[in-house]
Image (spheres, helix red, strand yellow):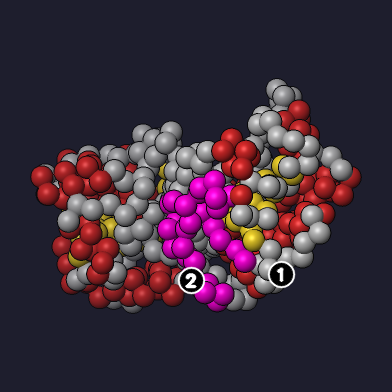
Amino acid sequence: MNTRTTLTHAQGLIRKFEARTGQVGVIGLGYVGLPLAVEKAKTGFQVLGFDRNAARVSQVNLGASYIEDVPEGELRDLVLASRRLEATGEWSRLAAMDAIVICVPTPLTRNLTPDLQYVEVVTREVARRLRPGQFVCLESTTYPGTTEEVIRPILESTGLREGEDFHLAFSPERVDPGNKRYTTRNTSKVVGAASPASLQVALSFYRQTIVEVVPVTSARVAEMVKVFENTFRAVNIALVNELAMLCDRMGLDVWEVLEAAGTKPFGIMPFFPGPGVGGHCIPLDPHYLEWKAREYNFNTRFIALAGEINRRMPEFVLQKAMRLLSDQGLGLRGARVLVLGLAYKKDVDDARESPAAEVLGLLAERGARVDYHDARVPRHADVHGAFHSVPLTREVLEETDLVLILTDHSDVDYPFVVRHAPRILDTRNATRGLLAEPGKVVKL
């Protein structure tokens, strides 16, 4: 294809994006896709969300939000009033899109290797409808090389050429569920592409919606940026988790140590221990980098060790709970244990990869009579059965042998818990500053 035609496809897309007349398709309406679709619609784009979950499609089209970070009133206005946002399960409508953004899960297999089945399936659906003059971008977290080694060949199997007929980029999501300060719009966006022309198209697409867009030289760089960001957090959380285990052995308060260390005005960042790591990123993403490194005969020992430490924390919490019960002359089997918080972090309703859920499972497995309270996660099921959040009443607390604070939601009345629970294991420092008789509250 000649240069004039190449420029025409890229420039045509750029003109549409700058005028906000381009049709935007977002595949996957979860924690990443729905907020992105909403932001695009708010800035004037016509947006069509694709999801194979019929219930999600129906909810979006009714203006009913199932994502905490997407206000229902805002969604309703975009769907029912301005009609800038719609959801569908019909792949055939991809052909009409100018931009197609892929926001699907990238889980791990049982062997901790990347599972790109969702990315590959939707990319094949895109390829079946791919036409000249379309822009495709992956936002799902993955290992460096996915965009050019997996997605590009599938799309080019149509006979269309990347950088000439269509444009391809990677821009990692940076969603932090529950964060009221940093949203999709004001969180800086890294963008890398498979070709220079595609980079210009991608920058134009995101600059209409995101306050700061950061270009990098390739899709591989952008993919590495994302897995590094989450690996950085995983490694530092592992450091403070190991410190917590050491402080437990030495009879020191790890929270006091960390608070004092945090007063240093340089050379340190705040990271905190807990019952483990959870969510859709930190427990998974480092393994993507670890797996890819093996292709280069490189052993990421530091990353592997961090993962090992973080995976030990639920068992450590269990053992500490057993010690506290033993101090009261109780065994774990038959003991009444109340778990406070089941979401993977405070003030969200997401229990994916939640260490609190893992601790609950370990307690049930060893015969404890375990209940939980989390108004944001009203139901939970695992191999041990179905659980329902119980009310946090005085009677519930007083009848419990041990309360485990595993997720420190802001809407929990911790002074009330401290007054009425016989003993508490606080893994999140939620009871900091509260007065209690000696030994009643034990920290991680």
Highlighted range, magenta: 369-397
Question: Looking at the picture, which amino acid does disc 2 mark?
Answer: Ala
Image location (x, y in percent) of residue 283: 59, 59
Q: Quadrant of residue 143?
A: bottom right
For the question of whether residue 79 can be seen, the reply is yes
Residue 251 relative to residue 87: left or right:
right
Image location (x, y in percent) of residue 57: 23, 63
Q: Is residue 43 magenta?
A: no
Taking 312 as reference, is 242 above or below it? above
Assign a secondary structure to mark 1. loop
Whole-number angstrom distance, CA of label 2 to CA of label 1: 19 Å
Report the residue marked by disc 1: 333
User: In which quadrant of the rendered image does the N terminus lie?
Assistant: bottom left
For the question of whether residue 214 can be seen, the reply is no
Count of marks, rendered view: 2
Name the one closer to the observer, 131 or 378.
Answer: 378
Residue at point 51% right, 41% down? 412
Name the one closer to the observer, 207 or 359.
Answer: 359
Image location (x, y in percent) of residue 115: 51, 73
